[in-house]
Amino acid sequence: MEKAILARSGLAATVACVAMAFGTVPALAAPFKCPRVGGDFVFGQEANVNSLDQPASNTISTRNVAMNIFETLITRDENNNPIPDLADSYTESPDRLTYTFKLRNGVKFHNGKPMTSADVVASFDRYARLGLERGMFKNVDKWEAPDASTFIIRMKEAQPTFIELLSSFSVPVVIVPAEQKDDAPMQLKTIGTGPWQLVDFVPGSHVKLKRYDGYTPNTHFEERTGFGGYKQACFDTVTFRIVTEPGARVAGLKTGELQGVEDLPTKALDDLKKDKNIAIVPLLNWWIQVAAPNTSVAPTDNVLFRKAVQAALDMDEIMDAATDGNYRLNVGFQYPNQPSYTDAGKEFYNIKDPAKAKQLLAQSGYKGEPVVLLTNKDYASMYNAALVMAEQLKAVGIKAELKVVDWPTSVNMQLKPDTGWNFFFTGYGTQPALGALATMQFFTPPNANYKPKDGKDDPDLMAAWNDMNSKPDAKDRQAAFARMQALIYERVYALPFGSLTKVQGVRANVQGFKPFRIPRMSNVWFSN
């Protein structure tokens, strides 16, 4: 008998449990309805958007906008559990070799076209060709559409983690019209099925969305949950305005020119908390601040050189500068409150031993070549982390140089190891929050962040990754994750500095806005 997974409302389940506890069974709550409709919600985003082609971009600035436009077969709820989204339900065969998705009825694209399984097939085909996390399909034999409302994925071998990978909204498999199957990377026409549709996108300036009046909400739910559930567009329009200067975001929020912002500097918080027109909404463990080495080019192709860099770094000093003190040191790629957390590799974290760094530097044969730190000013935390790291490297005899470009440019350069950089500054945010698999995908083909030399991935790393995905027992999968994390530290395929707290803010008349990995513009409204 196949195991069926249906969309269920967390709210409904909670009501039922409470009812049983008190011996009564009240009627389920009605689906969410906007208390007030109208207005333009202007949201101050801190970084430029390189593209709205969600499968081809793994930047959080893209995800912030695109995930309000596009939807997926399955996604995650508020507690990080996979739930159907455009799928009405799905079944997993007992041998875990077949996944059958039944599509929701009545879903339409923003161009008015009804969504069918043909669109799902085309979207998966495009993702398999250019999606940044297309490695998740390595174990997929084929997919097919026996009828207009059914989509089937057939596996080569059983993979207990496949649904976890597919439901990730790190770089999700969004569903687009079949006619867009051959759109080139970063040039996807922005036509989705979500509550919001694109009006205007001016790179470096803004992205404007409007309510999609043909949107069909998921009636298996009563409320928004995670990036799924019952969603409604309450505003007439939403404008993501690019505001890279922290002081400008603070000023805009205070005057009301901005009704929400995604990042407020720590030094401004005391003053903002006194303003009755502003609500501060912090989110702990927003991301792990990271420098990723380019192991394809000298001198960072030398593991002894990378170890010298690792030994030289004082993570407290770096994170203090990066966040104005609003941080926690963090070993690894998960957070201590998560079930998958491990401190494997901790002996290689926050060594801060200049003498050891100099010794390793001499052993590496370093000849004083420039070491380029690729960073940006869109994200102040990345820029400030790079400044401090550069000084720490200079102190042990490394000729560190900053290359400062805008965020989209740095991301595009990072994708190619021959564009003149040794360390790329970034933040792992949505991925660690989604769990160990989502984060470890950064170190797997086809787009491993550490840029393996000659495209030859570390076989030990890949063996651990395969075990993370294929071991039947969850304890064995967790052990593989610990092994993979330890290898990344030992061979210095990443330099995680620590975790920062993201402090968002909204005007007091903005209701329903809850801090999340990605700003959710549905089920949010103005009270007056």
Image (spheres, helix red, strand yellow):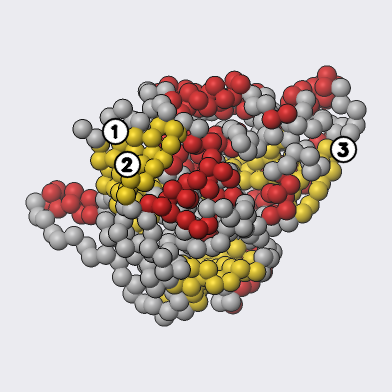
Badge number at residue 273: none
Real-space CA distance between mark 3 and mark 2, rounded to the nearest whole angstrom: 54 Å
Q: Is residue 426 above or below residue 451?
A: below
Badge number at residue 93: 1
Type of the residue with mark 3 = Pro
Considering the numbered disc 3 on the image, is that residue within a helix, a strand or a loop?
Answer: strand
- Which residue is at a point 61% across and 36% down the rendered structure image? 446
Structural crowding at the residue carrying mark 1, measured as other residues with C-alpha within 10 Å and reported as few (<14), some (14–19) or many (≥20): some
Q: Position of residue 237 (x, y in %)?
A: 49, 74
Quadrant in which residue 222 is drawn: bottom left
Structural crowding at the residue carrying mark 2, measured as other residues with C-alpha within 10 Å and reported as few (<14), some (14–19) or many (≥20): many
Real-space CA distance between mark 1 and mark 2, rounded to the nearest whole angstrom: 8 Å
Judge left or right: residue 424 versus residue 368. Answer: left
Q: Quadrant of the C terminus?
A: bottom left
Q: Position of residue 130 (x, y in %)?
A: 58, 45
Considering the numbered disc 2 on the image, is that residue within a helix, a strand or a loop?
Answer: strand
Residue located farthest toward the front when viewing the structure as drawn: 146
Quadrant in which residue 316 is drawn: top right
Q: Are marks 1 and 2 in contact (CB under 8 Å)?
A: yes
Q: Which residue is mark 2?
A: 100
Q: Which residue is mark 3?
A: 370
Real-space CA distance between mark 1 and mark 3, rounded to the nearest whole angstrom: 55 Å
